[in-house]
Image (tube, grey):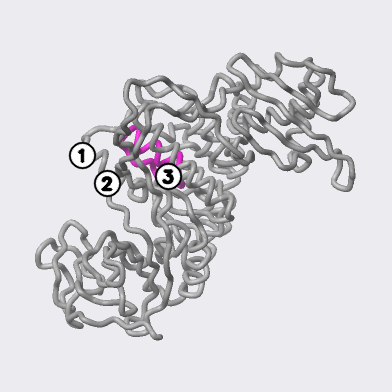
Amino acid sequence: MCSEAEGADAMKQLCPNPKCGAENALSDHDCPRCGTPQRQLLARGTILRGRYQIEAVRGCGGFGAVYRATDLQTGQTVAIKENQRHQTFQRFEREGKLLMQLSHPNLPKVHEVFVDPTTGRAFLVMDFVDGETLEEMLERLNRPLNWQEAQPIFAQVVQALTYLHQNKIVHRDIKPSNIIVTKRYETVYWEEVIAPPPELTEDHIANLTDDRRFKQGMNCWRNGWRLENTQRDGWTLMGNWRPSLLSPTVYHLTVTLTLGGISGQKCTCSDFRGRRLCKHLVALLLAWVHEPQRFKVVAEKKERRPVKRRVPRQVERQWVMLVDFGVAKVMEEVDPKRPRSSSIVAWTDGYSPPEQYASGGQVDARADQYALAATMVFALTGKTPDDAFTRMEKFRKGKPTLPPKPDGVPESVWKAIEVAMRFEPSQRFDDVGKFWEAETKPTGHRRTIKSAILGAIEGAEGGATSWRRRGAQL
């Protein structure tokens, strides 16, 4: 059945300013109430696809708007993202159908994507997230966040980004207004809790074997394609190691983490001798330290604790949602003064890396890493970073490219942010997981983090020069 826009006054339009909410005449160029330039948005009461009734504007960008709407079939509140750019409809639909297959607690669920022939626009229907953006949070607090406040928020953003990147999706528009912080209430029983595995570091692993096997294990871990079927059952790690791609031989690895180290280690290779770790077990443990997401969780270890009552209680928890992901980013015509490689690019000044301007949006996951770090700068300082090219110009003049580190923010956190915001993608961390490890586990990952940071610093000057040459050619 064809989509229809019905039930609304065709001569009305909603004001693009979410704080205004006025409904104006279609002929108005500026909102009589707040003065905002009008964008030919839908009117309140418009019904799309015979099902979704427009209630209000949630946000607005170059692509169109995000509306709050009511699903007349279920009575639920939904968010509807509008795309007015006809040249992007095909990509909008294709990526929308891909996003419909995703499911993650820190991402809104996408339910439907369609082109409406009456309005001549494309729409994406997703869960409505009611909360305040990171930008609104700082405005309400009238101060930046400290690291203790920011860490649990960005931990959830990293989880969402890791999931998107694993599904070959680059967000391309990480910024404070796209991070929504809300509250949820969970029922918690006092008598049983999940016991998370003990933390393990490279130094711990190095102390469990000799230098030769540790170095061999490090090389084995870096050749990670040989490590297969990694799983975690409580505190026990399991996996298989294949000596080569075509080898029929497979070594079975098992090791149990304890509060004091490890126990129950076993490998079927000939080098394993009881308590001494072979290189394959070293590789398994290094994979757990650096890539815990590779381990499929079979079951969690639980601990029972004596309590005086068995009545559950409601616990309020901060919940973070990453919105506006993956489809039809804010599309703006290229400024002739900007470097360009196509007639349309997608960027947000202050948060997009230089390659996002230069390549017309053809970026990889490291662009999200840059934007995530820039958003952290905003959260911790209250200041939006300079756009990428202003930062590069400051770098060439020997001036600081970021605000000073705020008091109370660990040095390792700020150093990791500087690495993630390098101009060349190759000089950033391999992925957002490595970036987050560098921020949250500096002591136990000294070797990895130090080499990553030093490598990026050594190549920074060459990176800025490279982008200068590239920008001059575009």
Q: Position of residue 48 (x, y in %)?
A: 31, 77
Local SS, label 1? helix
Question: Do the residues under discs 2 and 1 have CB atoms within 8 angstroms?
Answer: yes
Determine whether the residue tagged by mark 2 lies in a helix, strand or loop: strand
Q: Which residue is mark 2?
A: 132
Amino acid at the residue labelled 1: Arg
Residue at (51%, 66%) from the top-left corner?
95
Residue 46: name its quadrant: bottom left
Which region is colored magenta?
372-390
Q: Within 10 Å of the Cα at label 2, are there few (<14), some (14-19), or many (20+) other Cα atoms? A: some
Give me the disc on residue 140: 1
The spot of residue 230 in percent (x, y) is: 69, 39
Question: How far is mark 2 from mark 3, CA to CA?
Answer: 30 Å
Q: Residue at x 33, y 68 (%)?
A: 64
How far apart are labels 2 and 1 at the CA level?
10 Å
Side of 279 where 7 appears, left or right? left
Q: Who is closer to the viewer here, 335 or 405?
A: 405
Whether tag 2 and tag 3 are in contact, CB under 8 A, the answer is no
